[in-house]
Amino acid sequence: MNIEPKAPADIAAAIINPVSYAEWDGLLDKFDVLRRDMPVARIENGDLHDPFWLVTGYDDVMRMSKDNATFLNNPRGVVFGARQGEAMIKEITGGSPHLVNSLVALDAPIHPQYRRLTQEWFMPKNLRQLEDEIGALAKTTVDRLVDAGPEADFVPLVSAPYPLHVVMQILGVPEEDEQRMLFLTQQMFGGQDEDLNKTGMANMTAEQITQLVVGAVADFEAYFARLAKEKRGNPTADVASIIANAKVDGEYLNDRDMAGYYIIVASAGHDTTSASTAGAMMALAQDPEQFARLKADRSLLPGIVEEAIRWTTPVQHFMRTAAEDVEIGNVQVKKGDWLMMSYISANHDERIFDNPRKFDAARSPNRHLAFGAGAHQCLGLHMARLEMRILFNELLDRIETIELAGEPKRAKSSFVGGLKTLPLRYTLST
Ligand code: HEM
């Protein structure tokens, strides 16, 4: 047994550096090396970050995702960050590594109790009722693209605002508050890319950031407490009403838990879907024949959506803490050790996916891990697929041809990542 396989210094540095996630192919090369030589690798990189185990193989990531008793979402954080960041969060929360008390911060037995509250709402049967509403949002979004032609950046015009509108609609947040919600989310989660995070955090001291984050959390709680009060008096069909009226052990959720629920839905639902949408559009712009085929045969659309989600893998990792000593990938991990599941790497495992870097719309089966697996598997996965299908149907109806009009650029982010610009040139269908 390999006692302590340590990743080479250049690879360890790349894995923790948000910049390498913007340089996609170079990062994929590194994951290829790790899967081949060291599928569970120790990542150590100076004093700023705690060491952790990086798990890169599909089978190992699947096993960890499904074994929620051995690989916990506590007591360490579920998103990788610098030591100082974790210390700051603990100071704010009074000891918890999670800034908000959301589904991803919970383990059994509480997690299933909370998850059950909205599980039904997120199933396809219920989501079907939203198709017209989402269709209307898709239409106004594509109107904007049509008006802006023949050249435009797809990300700020289409792929970023559309999922945000959808998620705010299902949360019952009025359109005039959307930008505020977006800003608060950025303040809380401190996006790593300076072009995307407009909060000015990059130039602040740790104390200033702490103050900002405390303020954002309080603001969110107050906002959602008001919304919940409204939805208790006047329940509607949205998920906000379900959360506001939900009871655990006979009691309504308290303001902090309720805000946590709203925040996870609000934050998990937009950047992710946006990244897959932009990625699909880039792949189609690079392959005009595929675009034409899809226009003619919409039965290909679900396959394209699924492949886009695998190919982009917007949630790039989640962390777990070992509940006990356990062997994984021939490595002995100790109770309390921190592990990173790399969804990017798992979704590029050549033992599972032929030619994994290729965008292959006909890929079948396509059992990717972009939504995770097990107890925490993405609650919004049917919603993400539905949203993308509706938007692409609208795009395919109205756009005749697309091509790249410049170089697409990826965000510098080691957690949720994807394209931040996608310049397109397009013609309209007559
Ligand atoms: C392409 C789009 C999306 C991707 C790739 C994605 C990916 C993920 C992943 C990887 C997880 C963690 C899974 C795990 O730990 O095993 C997750 C959890 C979650 N996602 Fe998504 N997601 C997407 C869209 C959405 C949408 C649209 C919503 C809601 C509107 C949503 C809501 C959630 C929630 C609430 C959780 C936490 C579930 C739990 O811990 O029980 N996601 N997502």
Image (tube, rainbow, N blue to C red):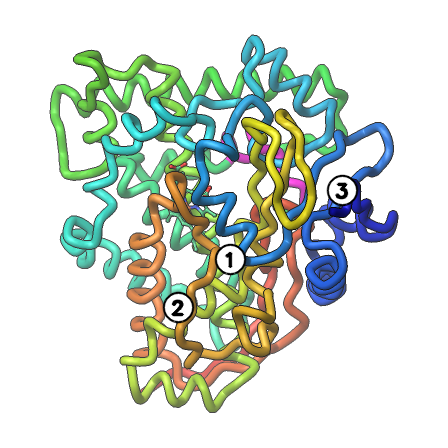
At mark 3, the secondary structure is: strand
Dot 2 or dot 3: first in sequence order is: 3
Identified at 47% across, 51% down, the residue is: 272
Q: Is residue 187 visible?
A: no
Residue at numbered disc 3: 42
Q: Nearer the viewer, residue 184 or 267?
A: 267
At mark 1, the secondary structure is: helix
Label 2–label 3 contact, CB within 8 A:
no
Residue at numbered disc 2: 305
Residue at numbered disc 1: 275
Q: Which residues are magenta?
A: 183-193
Dot 1 or dot 2: first in sequence order is: 1
**Whole-percent x, y for residue 107 in the image:** 42, 27
Mark 2: which amino acid? Answer: Val
Identified at 45% across, 19% down, the residue is: 219
Ligand 1 positioned in quadrant: top left
Mark 1: which amino acid? Answer: Ala
Q: How many marks?
A: 3
